[in-house]
Amino acid sequence: KGFNEHKPGAVITGSSNLTAAGIGVEEQVSNYEFNVLLHDFDDVQFATGEFENLWKDSVEILPKFLEEVRDGTYLAAAVSPHELYQKLLLEYFGQSIEYDPNAITDMPEGYKRLSYQMDAVTSGFRLLEKHGGFFLADVVGLGKTMIATLIAKKFFFHNGFPEHRSHTLIVVPPAIEDSWRETAKDQFRLDNCDIITNGSLHKVKRPEKYDLIIVDEAHKFRNDTAEAFDELQRICKSPTQHYLPDGSRASKRVILVSATPLNNRPDDIRNLISLFQDLKDSTLSVANLQRFFAQRQKEYQEAHRQSDPEEARRRVKDIYELIRTKIISEVTVRRTRNDLMEHDDYKQDLATQGVIFPKIEPPRKILYQLPPPLEDLYDRTMLLLSRTDGKGLTYNRYRAIGFLKPEKKQKYQNADRISSQLATIMRTLLVKRLDSSFHAFKESLRRFRDATGVMRDMFARGTIYIAPNLNVTEFLMEGREEELIAKIAGRQPTDPTIEICSPSDFQPGLTEGLESDWQRLDELYTEWKKVEADPKLDEFLARLEDGLFDPKINRQHKLVVFSESEETTSYLLGRLTKAGYKRVFTVSSKNRAERMPVVRANFDANFKDQANDYDILISTEVLAEGVNLHRANVIVNYDTPWNSTRLMQRVGRVNRIGSMAPHIYIYNFYPTAKVDDDIELKKKAIMKLQAFHTALGEDSQIYSETEEVDNFGLFERSLEEEERDQRLALLMELRRFRQQNPEEFRRIKGLPLRARVGRAHEPRAGSTVTFIRSNRRDAFYRMKPDGALEEISLLEAADEFRAPNPREEAIPLHAAHYDHINSALAKFKESVVAEALQAETVDATQGPNEQRALRYLDGFSSLPFVNEQERALIQAAKAAIRRARFQNLQRQINQLQRSTKTVKLTPAALADKLMQILRTYPLLQEDDKPVAAAPRAFDTTPDIILSESFDQP
């Protein structure tokens, strides 16, 4: 007051601006700011005037306004436990809550619009957008082919249409190619769609043409060392011709159709996911899938070494549960029949549409009894086939390249592994043929004996022909050696696998094993040739007369019989015809195409032009996939179904939408001894199955990966025991809440984030649960009273938050609530940052094979004759290896590196061979820029979605 030029005054102004512009390090823009204290009259007068002018236009902020602002945030929001539970479900499921009736449009005549399929289309399309691919894993018979086709149609119209017209490639087993063609192209009119079989992937010359890849029976590609997997991965990870607004090319989308994505080893699941994800740079909440699955595979192998079956089962179950919750649940659309029947929305829709799912009755045993002499021969045969102590067969006929001396063996990659695998395949074949039918076994035994004799004779003559692509045995047995020699001479210049050897080219042990095998096989075949009895066939014929066509279980008078062996199916046809059954026919890979119209007319309930010419269908596995046989409801497994996938595929032929019978019956044949006591009968059957398990090894699980013979449910277990999708149950619960309480639903949806509530609950007193989210992942944490912190699953969190009583009142938060939340936030940040950094600094986690390949590539980058385009290709290859984009890339590079130790090449020649390898992979776009992975954001800032603390009542 009274301020003038003669009185002291002061003004303080400025701010500490520590941005790049504020401290002057920006080259383009600098905005220096200073903190200053001024005393000059003019400066003080100017500042005073400016302040007064601003004050006149100021807006009053009174306490009531602060209250209004506070009331719109979590600070004032009064939330009940029941409301917080609904908010949890709302935040987790997001747009999945919405039921999209337009997800399925223009359905062909004869197809029903089912709500669970509409949901599957919507969910699958969202996963395509989010992760670039997903598993479509609805159980057998729920219409996966149709759902995949509808997703492809939706994708066509949402992927740049009409400027860009998407192309779809569908990869299928040969047995279901016609079925896919009929569904996708003929009925649903999917535009720009090509369908090829598994073995034709090499024919895809322009993979960039395709925007979407659909792979049916995707579990067939689970082995990443197989050539077919490598071909498919290159196709799936090549860029498309669809240019995005930023000038880059869109990556492909991939749908993996498999009813059993979790029925494989951890490594198998990893390989399938790698068809649409980079293993060290994924878009899933687990960024480094390679590291995750390496740990699970190690645990899996340790579990299988456990001597206690119960402990092994528990460990394997824990491994798969972790894979399911951490990985599979994020990239899978799956519904089981139990899911559909337990949720009213789906159940009512199915009832309205007249869709009925039959009940699968527990498998029924058919024991065929072996009389003592035949049982003795049977048991001795099984022992001879499976023993590895020197007293069984050596299978040296199929292990010849493994016995080659090093200078010859180097011509064949992985010679020891291949020879061992061939021997295992032959042993497995003989064991399965013995189980299939005595007729099929005798034929297989004779061929094996003859093939072993031919190789033994080649050694005796001093000339051994190794020609994997020629049937050497057939030529020599038919006396056509001169023709064989001529063919070898003609093909040898272009077929590097052909080799003409002498006995001295082989290490000791091969000829001794061949001689031993031939003697044993000849003696065994002589014994089996005398066997005319067939108790299995006799029992089957007896059941046809009394049981299998009983109208109480088989009202349609249709029967489907499966066998792996075509010789068994042909044998059964002949014997049934001889026994007076005229309305019977067989299907195999040789006649499938011509017989399919008859199959469909007589056994497909959906077929328009029905016929009734045949009652019994006998088929190999060629009809175990992608075929409707649901006019029948009785299946006979003439062979033992040696794994759960095979069994469910067979059952799935009759257990389909539109099945005509209310119950499905499955009959399995098992051998046993001829005894009078039922308990002893079952015991003998179990002992023989144990012998099969021992002989077949890992391929012998009948119902699950961990099933043991001494306690599996061969005779009791129901095949209705499908797992339930508990997340689906939560989603349907939320939908019901919205339907019944639309106003309340909208109000809870509008509640702010960070909502928290205290709750009276004595058993959980002192604990806290919270839901935290970043743009990368969701996480749920539980903090115990002692400060211990653990991450929990959605289902566990839902159990903690669940509050069924809408009138339950909140209580004050306990004293440790905020400390608990801060601990959870710190843990979340730590895990997300670690994953992000690990994904970015992938060099630190490279295994020895990757490091070797990277060092080898580095050696070429500085060579003077390597041009800029080739250097760019090398850099792109290094980036792909760091991200684990292609499993076989580093293998091929290291193989080239190893080959130089035996074959000397100039650096220029080596560079040419390296470039040949790199150019087979989609590493560069047309503009020579590395193909970008799916965009990922590394902002790790978390949001507290909601939290709840528990205290004493």
Image: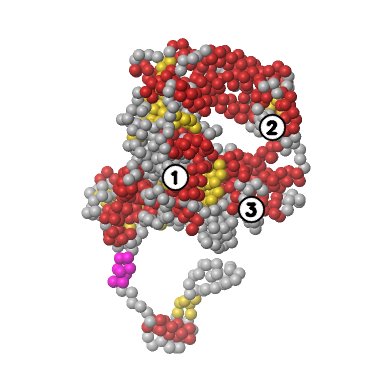
Q: Is residue 450 left or right of residue 376?
A: right
Picture disc at residue 497:
2
- For the residue marked with disc 1, what is the amino acid? Lys
Choose the circle earlier in sequence order: 3 or 1. 1
Q: Which residues are magenta?
A: 63-72
Quadrant in which residue 10 is drawn: bottom left
Q: Quadrant of the N terminus?
A: bottom left
Helix, strand or loop at label 2? It is loop
Choose the circle earlier in sequence order: 1 or 2. 1
Q: Residue at x 44, y 38 (%)?
A: 601
Which is more foreground, mark 1 or mark 2?
Answer: 1
- For the residue marked with disc 2, what is the amino acid? Thr
- Estimate the spatial distance between the alpha carbons at disc 2 and disc 3, rounded to whole Å: 33 Å
Q: Is residue 793 something one can see in this rendering?
A: yes
- Estimate the spatial distance between the alpha carbons at disc 1 and disc 2, rounded to whole Å: 42 Å
Quadrant in which residue 559 is drawn: top left
In the image, residue 71 lies in the stretch drawn in magenta? yes
Helix, strand or loop at label 3? It is loop
| Residue 288 percent coordinates (x, y) | 52, 46
| Residue 178 percent coordinates (x, y) | 51, 42
Q: Residues within 10 Å of mark 1 (few under 14, many from 20)?
A: many
Quickly name the residue at label 1: 144
Magenta segment, prevailing SS (helix, strand or loop): helix
Q: Residues within 10 Å of mark 2 (few under 14, many from 20)?
A: few
- Camera-side residue of 213 and 618: 618
